[in-house]
Amino acid sequence: MLTERYAKDELARHLLPLDEFHPYPTADDRAAWEGLPAALRKADTAAAEARLGMEWPSLPATVFMQFRRDGNRSNFEELGFERRSALNDLVIGECQEAEGRFVDDIINGLWCTCEESFWGVPAHSDSSRFPGTPLPDTADRIIDLFAGETAGLLAWTCYLLRTRLDAVHPVICDRIQREMQERIIGPYLARDDYWWMGLETDAHGRSLRSMNNWTPWCVSNCLTAVLLMEPDRERRLAAVLKALRSLDRFLEVYHSDGGCDEGPSYWGRAGASMFDCLNLLWQATGGLVDVWDEPLIQNMGRYIYRVHIAGDWFVNFADCPARVGIPAHLVYLYGRRIGDDGLVAMGAGFHREQSAAGRHLGRAAGLLRRLPATFATAQVDALSLGYPYVRDVWMEGLQVMTAREREGSAEGLFLAAKGGHNAESHNHNDVGQFIVYHDGQPVLVDAGVERYTAKTFSPQRYEIWTMQSAYHNLPTIGGLQQVPGHTRAAAGTHYEMDDSVARLRLDIAPAYPQEARLSRWNRTCELRRGGQAAVLVRDCFELAQAIPVTLSLMTPREPTLEGDGTLRLRGDTDVIVTYDADALEAAVESIDIADERLQPAWGGRLYRVLLKSRGPVDSGDWELRVEAG
């Protein structure tokens, strides 16, 4: 898409030189900063004041080594991310106030960051010289997600505050310039072997690795570093051309529906990071790079409201929490760029809720997002729009459907179901998974993912319970669960919808191992609308031999077994699940939740309802009915 549209000579004519690239007001532009909403300026200044005189966290080598020693990646990440967050707050605070109160603390943050051996995180610290090293190899510069994020933070700091930093001493920005060239800009221009670039190809020109959110996320920060710190025109152009090639590789893995197989939380670093890249390129070329009218780019933005349930609840297939903090201003700006009222409304709705809760999500992001969020706040404040609440969605590429009782409302039943395959990015073994909500609250759910460890992205990934089909709303056949792989995919997928029903049919048998002896497992998930609204899940199956079969149902609501094929799930409004008691007997397991990534959605407990066949079976035609009590 991008390399086809924009030739080198045309880009060379339009790419702004370093001294003409002014995407946002610097701290010296007092009219722009002082014209921001008073509440925002006050909140930003207070956040910076909380950092005054802080002791910057130490980053011991032994804590870095924990990832290789015992699998813990979080202890080091929390220390490093705290440094980045503090510097972010101090820089914006100085831009808002411009009295010099925060400059010394900013210098402390810049200096200790420049002294770090690696700007990334232990889980991404690979080395071609020392494979598996527990410490970063400073002779092999790796650009990972967070090395890029750090580079972006330092580049924006110099851009915004250069005159104030130079007034203390020019050596500060000079050092940042040299560190940036050595760690980011130089390696980015010289190397094609970072996997996320997608530039290593086979004999047919196909990328050797499938791209995911790493590509636009890393590219957005490498572009930031180059556009804000690289004075050489040829090197600036070379970086832009390389970025276009990588972004095209990323777009190649997307289906035309724009669906993100990594889930809505990773959309924030997939489709949303694509927006970051395109916005930077649009700014840096004076509007030349403009693909906002491309259907794929538009659908990548719309994905985020197509998987929205209600409030901060989202359809959370793959490594995604059920509750997602959406970058409200970015969603709003994406909607403005592509002319989509639904995205604009969603961004405004989330901004309103986040502001009421005292949260400003731009603060949690890097300056690449915080700056546009800051200067769009007044526009978003002026809107009073809500969520689009789309009634029916079918993303054929992902094989994901969503359906709600009525357009424009979170009231009533909501169903989402998926086909797909078991080798998606951030995959769970979950072909045929479905979730149900009622009045915007969870009923039958996808647990999500625990805090990442070394095991999460290793050959032992599917030893983790949240990744297993037995802990999704799926069958287990003779003790056998689904297995990973591209060929472990739904077959015969068929979707249909009208005003009275939305329905997905698929055969999930290929997702199971041969030992399960499955001839077919046809699952139908449907939402019936109208006076007797209900979700129905029907499983028709045939096995080559009679074996026990169990259906799992995951719920955060305390289940009550009423003995007659009725399961009551307690809530503000009870929800009733009915099943064939002649064929199935029910049992309930309680799963204690201590993980900090799962607790925000589920508190301290989830329940697993096990509907077990009353003996070995070689076929069945079972139906679950879910409706409000």
Image (spheres, rainbow, N blue to C red):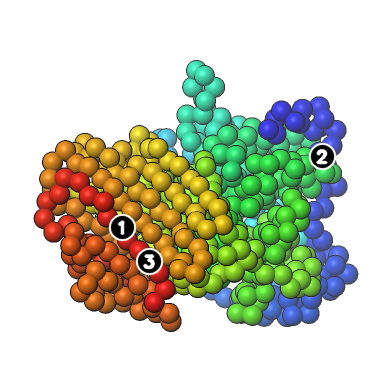
In the picture as drawn, the residue positioned furthest to the front comes out as 531
Dot 1 alpha-carbon crowd within 10 angstroms: few under 14, some 14 to 19, many 20 or more: some
Left or right? Give the position of 429 relative to 379: left
In the picture of the structure, the residue carrying the numbered disc 2 is 288
Determine the secondary structure under disc 3.
strand
> What residue is rendered at 82% in x and 61% in y?
25
Residue nearest the viewer, comparing 149 with 434 = 434
> What residue is rendered at 84% in x and 74% in y?
34
In the picture of the structure, the residue carrying the numbered disc 3 is 626
Residue nearest the viewer, comparing 466 with 585 = 585
Quadrant location, the N terminus: top right
The residue under label 2 is which amino acid type? Answer: Leu
Q: Is residue 75 visible?
A: no
Residue nearest the viewer, comparing 139 with 510 = 510
Q: Which mark is residue 623?
A: 1
Q: Is residue 310 visible?
A: yes
Q: CA distance from mark 1 to mark 2?
A: 56 Å
Q: Which mark is residue 260?
A: none
Q: Position of residue 403 (x, y in %)?
A: 52, 58
Foreground: disc 1 or disc 2:
1
Q: Position of residue 624 (x, y in %)?
A: 32, 61
The residue under label 1 is which amino acid type? Answer: Glu
Determine the secondary structure under disc 2.
loop
Quadrant location, the C terminus: bottom left
Q: Residue 36's quadrant in the figure?
A: bottom right
Dot 3 alpha-carbon crowd within 10 angstroms: few under 14, some 14 to 19, many 20 or more: many
Q: Position of residue 138 (x, y in %)?
A: 48, 44
Left or right? Give the position of 28 relative to 429: right
Q: Position of residue 61 (x, y in %)?
A: 40, 57
